[in-house]
């Protein structure tokens, strides 16, 4: 075990023996010599923020393809130096992958040379792998007919969803998996035909529910198991239930009222200290499903032997990672899929045995490369023989070690994104003056659309139903052509025809808040990635503990939060 002080925030942190064993295991061998990855110099949180700085998930700009000059939507703002390409040009032979190659200069910093390469080669405008008919998706894989979805995979016909997997016909969800027709929901799995769920599993036709399992037709209820026709946690007759629900769902105003009431109402019920479902071994953190031995991690699915990871799906042997799926043996990686035995990688797909790469695909044995596809044995995009590659990489790592670069993820200073464009800003928001003080890049330019009025105000969804309103078709026309002014931020936004069709078909109220505001509201629904040591708050006398339950645990619920937080055993006794 080693005690360290973070060189950025100066907080103390501990590198455990297990961590050191992992660094050893992942350390590569080149030309007969093993290059040990040194213990980190930043604390886990500063490392997470550094990785997040390299991920712009949702801030899109109108830009121009550097080859065909077509207008494109891009994660790179027009004032940035990287040369973005539309996906047709990027995946074509209109450019040569080696045209920006360079010789490694042993007298210069590695990161400086990588930065030069990053700004001279072409980059893909948005990261979408194997997506069909889904123009504005980013960091998304195997999805089709999706619109403005990010960070997910295998979704069909979804709108404004983030970090969702295997979803069909969903809108405005975050971290929802294996679900159909679920809307405005967060961290729920295997649900159908439902809206405004939080942390629900296998629920059908439920609205505004929290921590419910296997329920059918329940409304604004918390901690229910296999219940039907529950309304604010009370059982009703079917007819009465349907009548009461309709009073809320019939209008936009009713839905907003139900949302506000549910938010208050759920505080009357206990919360479990963590959501760790079907996990084995030693797991700490929160929101984990089907995982084993995952420590200090959040939002993991099917993950094994991991530490300090966030938004991970189907991974083994992984440490310090952000939004990675389907791979093994990864250290300090972000925004990638199918990586194997690699470290310090970001925005790559199907790459093995590689280090310090950005935007590379279907390759192996790369070092410090950008935008390469189907290559091996390249350094700074230059091709070498296998033997030359190994000798050269060994020399580069030796030099990087002397300069304190080996073992560090890409520095924030050379990220193609400003702090306020990146994932870091969403999870660790700071003000501009603080960013300037910390020497972080800041996007000052406002590229948003101006003076969009006159505005269209959406009506209640029944007004778009021809059986209720004879002028429904006119209303549909007006809505599609119109620009809506966000009722919170004032920012203009549009509803596209496919999206409106989904609202009408599922009787969902048309949003009146900008997608950014809705996204922020979903982010605010879950706890931040911090653990607090707390005591169970249960004082129920029939649980067998005299006075307050003595059980202690690590939880993401900060001590000043309003929720009643229970240990596993008290929580199980409290659910009905
Ligand atoms: Zn730190
Ligand atoms: Zn193009
Ligand atoms: Zn307890
Ligand atoms: Zn108790």
Image: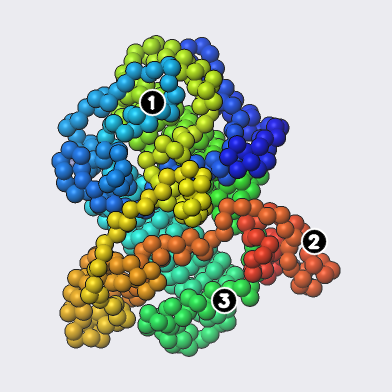
Name the residue at 51% across, 36% down: 332
Q: Are marks 1 and 2 in contact (CB under 8 Å)?
A: no
Q: Is residue 210 left or right of residue 535?
A: left
Read off the residue under disc 3. Answer: 264
Read off the residue under disc 1. Answer: 113
Q: Is residue 459 left or right of residue 151?
A: left
Q: Position of residue 359 (x, y in %)?
A: 35, 36
Name the residue at 46% across, 34% down: 410
Badge count: 3
Q: Is residue 142 left or right of residue 335?
A: left
Q: Is residue 2 left or right of residue 218?
A: right
* 569 versus 83 height, above or below: below
Q: Residues within 10 Å of mark 2 (few under 14, many from 20)?
A: few
Q: Nearer the viewer, residue 9 or 312?
A: 9
Residue 332 in view in this figure: yes
Name the residue at 40% across, 56% down: 162
Q: Is mark 2 within 8 Å of ligand 3?
A: yes
Secondary structure, mark 2, is: loop
Dot label at residue 415:
none
Name the residue at 15% across, 41% down: 68
Q: Residues within 10 Å of mark 3 (few under 14, many from 20)?
A: few
Q: Position of residue 406 (x, y in %)?
A: 51, 25
Q: Is mark 3 within 8 Å of ligand 4?
A: no
Q: Nearer the viewer, residue 556 or 181?
A: 556
């Amino acid at each position: 075990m080693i005690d360290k002080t973070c060189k950025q925030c100066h907080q103390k942190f501990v590198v455990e023996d297990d961590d050191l064993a992992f660094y050893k295991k992942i350390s590569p061998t080149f030309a007969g010599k093993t290059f040990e990855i040194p213990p980190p110099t930043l604390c886990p949180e500063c490392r997470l923020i550094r990785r997040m700085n390299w991920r712009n998930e949702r801030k899109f700009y109108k830009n121009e393809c550097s080859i065909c000059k077509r207008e494109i939507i891009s994660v790179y703002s027009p004032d940035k130096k990287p040369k973005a390409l539309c996906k047709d040009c990027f995946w074509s032979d209109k450019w040569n992958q080696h045209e920006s190659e360079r010789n490694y200069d042993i007298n210069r910093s590695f990161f400086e040379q990588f930065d030069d390469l990053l700004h001279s080669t072409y980059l893909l405008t948005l990261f979408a792998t194997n997506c069909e008919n889904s123009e504005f998706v980013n960091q998304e894989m195997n999805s089709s007919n999706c619109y403005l979805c990010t960070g997910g995979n295998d979704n069909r016909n979804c709108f404004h969803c983030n970090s969702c997997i295997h979803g069909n016909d969903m809108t405005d969800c975050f971290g929802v998996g294996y679900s159909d027709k679920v809307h405005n929901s967060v961290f729920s799995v295997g649900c159908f035909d439902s809206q405004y769920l939080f942390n629900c599993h296998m629920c059908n036709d439920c609205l505004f529910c929290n921590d419910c399992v296997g329920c059918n037709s329940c409304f604004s209820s918390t901690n229910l198991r296999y219940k039907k026709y529950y309304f604010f946690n009370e059982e009703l007759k079917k007819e009465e239930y349907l009548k009461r629900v309709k009073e809320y769902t019939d209008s936009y105003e009713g839905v907003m009222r139900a949302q506000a009431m549910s938010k208050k109402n759920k505080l009357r019920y206990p919360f479990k200290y963590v959501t760790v479902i079907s996990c084995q071994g030693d797991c700490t953190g929160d929101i984990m499903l089907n995982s084993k031995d995952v420590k200090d991690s959040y939002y993991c699915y099917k993950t094994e032997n991991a530490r300090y990871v966030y938004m991970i799906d189907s991974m083994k042997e992984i440490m310090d990672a952000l939004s990675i799926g389907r791979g093994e043996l990864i250290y300090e990686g972000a925004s990638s899929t199918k990586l194997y035995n690699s470290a310090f990688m970001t925005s790559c797909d199907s790459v093995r045995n590689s280090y310090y790469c950005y935007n590379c695909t279907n390759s192996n044995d790369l070092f410090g490369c950008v935008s390469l596809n189907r290559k091996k044995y390249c350094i700074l995009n230059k091709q070498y023989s296998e033997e030359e590659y190994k000798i050269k990489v060994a020399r580069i790592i030796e030099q990087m070690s002397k300069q304190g670069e080996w073992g560090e993820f890409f520095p924030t200073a050379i990220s193609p994104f400003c702090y306020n464009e990146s994932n870091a800003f969403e999870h660790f928001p700071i003000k501009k003056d603080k960013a300037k003080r910390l020497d972080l890049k800041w996007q000052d330019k406002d590229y948003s659309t101006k003076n969009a009025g006159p505005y269209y105000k959406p009506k209640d969804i029944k007004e778009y139903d021809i059986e209720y309103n004879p002028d429904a078709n006119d209303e549909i026309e007006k809505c599609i052509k119109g620009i809506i002014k966000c009722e919170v931020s004032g920012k203009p936004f549009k509803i596209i025809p496919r999206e409106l069709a989904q609202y009408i078909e599922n009787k969902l109220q048309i949003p009146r808040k900008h997608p950014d505001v809705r996204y922020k509201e979903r982010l605010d629904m879950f706890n931040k990635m911090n653990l607090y040591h707390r005591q169970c708050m249960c004082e129920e006398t029939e649980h067998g503990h005299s006075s307050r339950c003595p059980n202690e645990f690590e939880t993401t619920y900060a001590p000043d939060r309003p929720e009643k937080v229970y240990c596993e055993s008290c929580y199980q006794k409290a659910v009905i």
